[in-house]
Amino acid sequence: MTIGAVLIDIDGVLYVGDRPVAGADRALSELDRRGIPYRFVSNTTRRSRRSVARRLQELGYTIPDTAIITAPVAAAAHLKEGGRTRCFLLTTPDARRDFEEAGIVAVEEDADAVVVADAADGLTYASMNRAFRLLMDGADLVALEKDRYWMGPDGLMLSAGPFVAALEYAAGKEAEVIGKPSPAFFIRALREIGAGPDEAAMVGDDIVTDIGGARACGMKGILVRTGKYRREAVRQSGITPDLVIESLADLPDHI
């Protein structure tokens, strides 16, 4: 497989729970040695980009925050470009920083958009009902991601998808998805490294958002058997990866 650029998921690919994936750092060094450009793309929405970079440093990686593209960063830029700067942010306080730094104003009334992320304990009945009322008043529904679940330190965790689906059902509106598997998210990341979809590959542990999204965008999809990977989920998805490897450590052997 000849690949000219790589997009790499973070959670479940660089680390699982509190442990870095063995050999992943060596794989990144080999990509550097070969001159293959890459960016890290993540649907992780609990942390700001700065916090993601700090977390990776704690796990032994040397990755600048400028090499990381998260759904909050992409969403903030997208909203600002569209003139939707007053938003009700269903996010964690940490992720909110990426919006505020981009000029997005967090509001409780007269919102241009309701932005839904994996806000953890912030996803209460009261906050969901506030979001519902704003949607009924005309606000747009923007989802940072629609993942069903992710692998936390102590097991599978609900992601933002179930809560987005609840608001879609209640308000009768379809969410605009900013993170993976949105083609615009992949294209934004590839643009930063000057690559096109036809020459790039996405490496991830989610058969739908990582592999399905990448292939729909014209990229190759490389699935790793770490993180949330489940054989049954792959079978049921109907999506066929271009390549399946044990972990990111094996990537250099196949490109």
Image (cartoon, rainbow, N blue to C red):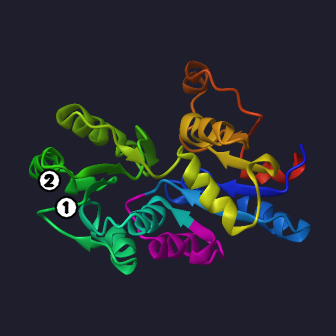
71 vs 136: above or below: below
Residue holding disc 1: 111
Give percent across and percent down for residue 197.
74, 49
Q: Nearer the viewer, residue 14 or 203?
A: 203
Q: Residue at x 29, y 61 (%)?
A: 91
Q: Which mark is residue 127?
A: 2
For badge 2, the amino acid type reads Ser
Q: Residue furthest front?
A: 83
Q: Residues within 10 Å of mark 1 (few under 14, many from 20)?
A: many
Residue 186 x %, y %: 61, 53
Say left or right for 23 vs 213.
Answer: right
Q: Is residue 237 located in the magenta-colored stretch of the structure?
A: no
Q: Nearer the viewer, residue 159 or 171?
A: 171
Q: Quadrant of residue 77?
A: bottom left
The answer to which of marks 2 and 1 sits earlier in the sequence is: 1
Left or right of residue 7: residue 95:
left
Return the x and y of residue 160 as percentages of the image width and height.
34, 46
- Which quadrant of the figure contains the N terminus? top right
Please state the horizontal and vertical placement of residue 209, each as a whole percent of the image: 54, 40
For label 2, the SS is helix
Q: Which quadrant of the view contains residue 132?
A: top left
Whether residue 22 is visible, yes or no, is no
Along the line of sight, the residue nearer the viewer: 92 or 230:
92
The answer to if 61 sits in the magenta stretch is: yes
- The answer to whether any part of residue 210 appears in the image is yes
Looking at numbered disc 1 in the image, what kind of residue is underneath it?
Answer: Ala
Q: Would residue 75 be found to the left or right of residue 66 on screen?
A: left
Q: Which residues are magenta?
A: 45-68
In the image, residue 225 sits, relative to residue 192, either above or below, namely: above
At a point 48% along the width and 63% down the height, the residue shown is 74
The residue lying at 85 percent from left, 51 percent from top is: 3
